[in-house]
Amino acid sequence: MGIGVDKVTGRARIVIIGGSFGGLSAAFALRRKLGPERAEITLLSREENFTFVPSLTWVAVGSRRLSQISFGLSAPLAGKQVAFVNDAVIAIDTEKKTVTTANREFSYDFLIIATGHRSANEAVEGLGPFTGPGHSPMSAPEAEELATAIQVLLRNPAPVVVGAAPGASCIGPAYELAFGIDYLLRKKKLRHLVPISFVTPEPYLGHMGMGGAGKIRQLLEGALEERDIAYRTSAAIKAITPDAINIEGETPIGSQLSIIIPPLAGVDVVAKTPQLSNPKGFIVVDEHFRHKVAEGVYAIGVAVALPPAESTPVPVNFPKTGHMTEQMATIAAQDLIGEILGSKRGPSAELSARCVLDMGDRGIYLSADPVRPPRNRIPTVSEGRQWLLVKRAFERTYLWNAAHGRKMPTTFGW
Ligand SMILES: Cc1cc2nc3c(=O)[nH]c(=O)nc-3n(C[C@H](O)[C@H](O)[C@H](O)COP(=O)(O)OP(=O)(O)OC[C@H]3O[C@@H](n4cnc5c(N)ncnc54)[C@H](O)[C@@H]3O)c2cc1C
């Protein structure tokens, strides 16, 4: 009998918190190797649905409805004999090995935390949308709010600023939204009425918190310049007001629609659990994504603490993409399976990044291996319409497979 197996039932009790890329992939990967006789798996999520988060930018620019990029979690999980509890976890006790919702307490032998982020909107005055005049695509409700704001812009053309606040780590969607709004306005022959600026804490375009990659910097500079999108780098946004963006040491930029990616923090329940996370609420793990102190606890995805790639004049944090989240889920699941079956630990690996940046009518494919420089391979950076088609096909395939309990594609087209 392996470690962490319940003495009475002979089964390991695995609890997963979060039903997005990390949580769902981990649940499927565990079940592929651990039948119900080996492991009782429970997934708790405060959302009833899985949402394909990368497509929230498409919800914002009106090319997707939320219903097209989400599905109910209960059916695919039931098909895998994973108990689904649609409830928010309000307490984690790593000594007693329990997690608690408003309705119930769950005991675990192993816990996988895949709770993603909290937008730290308090970091900059005016970050929004529900706390200030700024807009953001970081969650489904925020993306829908942004979609409405973009419709208002189309009726009343006015200056737009897109960008990221100091300390942001998820900068790709800011580029996608700048390109997406530019493309939308050009299609409607309104672009000449709307000055667009891109404002980023990155020391140069395409840094993305990972020290850049190959020719992405040159490509993005050219792409913004040919689209008349003005840009400022190493910009520390201080405040967002209803009609301007204030940047430290610089003249404010007039803006009626300010879309600013916030810095992220860990969710409250993780941040408040003693000795679970760092001061930002992110969880420090080993190379198998296992907590260094709390027994039986793993963390994957955006919930994990990853140090910045380098020090920059304005802070930029390390990215945690969907593709990286899937790799973390696989490594953690393999390690946990080895632990339960009493076999050797699963492999660990340096995370790599592959993603496609949507530019409205074309895409940029970027591959960096490993994500953190220096790298073994010269990064691949390629621009073309085909990449956008790949991104769209990936979204459809991922959603179909996930909704039907099939193995999701993991590498190509994020
Ligand atoms: C707008 C946008 C565009 C992006 N585009 C790309 C892209 O093109 N390519 C790419 O690779 N990555 C992209 N990313 C990043 C990618 O979406 C994330 O890496 C991925 O969503 C992380 O998955 P996760 O499972 O760690 O967390 P999340 O997706 O954040 O999910 C966390 C889950 O945990 C649940 N949860 C949180 N707290 C609790 C609680 N207390 N109790 C119960 N449940 C809880 C939440 O409800 C949520 O379902 C994008 C992100 C954003 C915001």
Image (cartoon, rainbow, N blue to C red):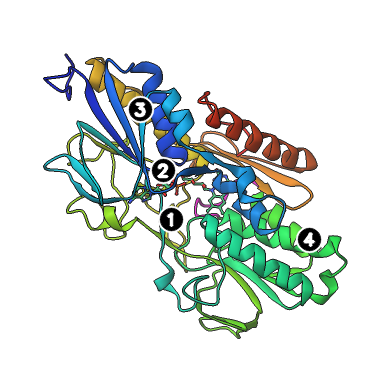
- Label 4 belongs to which residue? 184
Residue at the far right: name it.
Answer: 189
Rounded to the nearest whole Å, what is the CA distance between mark 1 and mark 2? 20 Å
**Between disc 1 and disc 4, whose residue precedes?**
4
Residue 118 in view of the camera: yes
Q: Kindly identify the amino acid type of the residue bearing the numbered disc 4.
A: Leu
- Label 2 belongs to which residue? 301
**Between disc 2 and disc 4, whose residue precedes?**
4
User: Residue 14: where, in percent of width, then height?
Assistant: 27, 30
**Between disc 3 and disc 1, whose residue precedes?**
1
Label 4 crowding class (10 Å Cα cut-off): few <14, some 14-19, many 20+? some
Give the answer, above or below, for where 245 lies relative to 93: below
**Total number of numbered discs in the rendering:** 4
**Between disc 2 and disc 3, whose residue precedes?**
2
Q: Kindly identify the amino acid type of the residue bearing the numbered disc 3.
A: Ala
**Between disc 4 and disc 3, whose residue precedes?**
4
| Residue 398 falls left or right of residue 20 | right
**Disc 2 on helix, strand or loop?**
helix
Give the answer, above or below, for where 194 lies relative to 310: below
Q: Residue drawn at (61%, 50%), measured in percent from left and top?
A: 66
Residue 33: within the magenta? no
Residue at the far front: name it.
Answer: 103
Q: Which mark is residue 193?
A: none
- Label 1 belongs to which residue? 310
- Label 3 belongs to which residue? 333
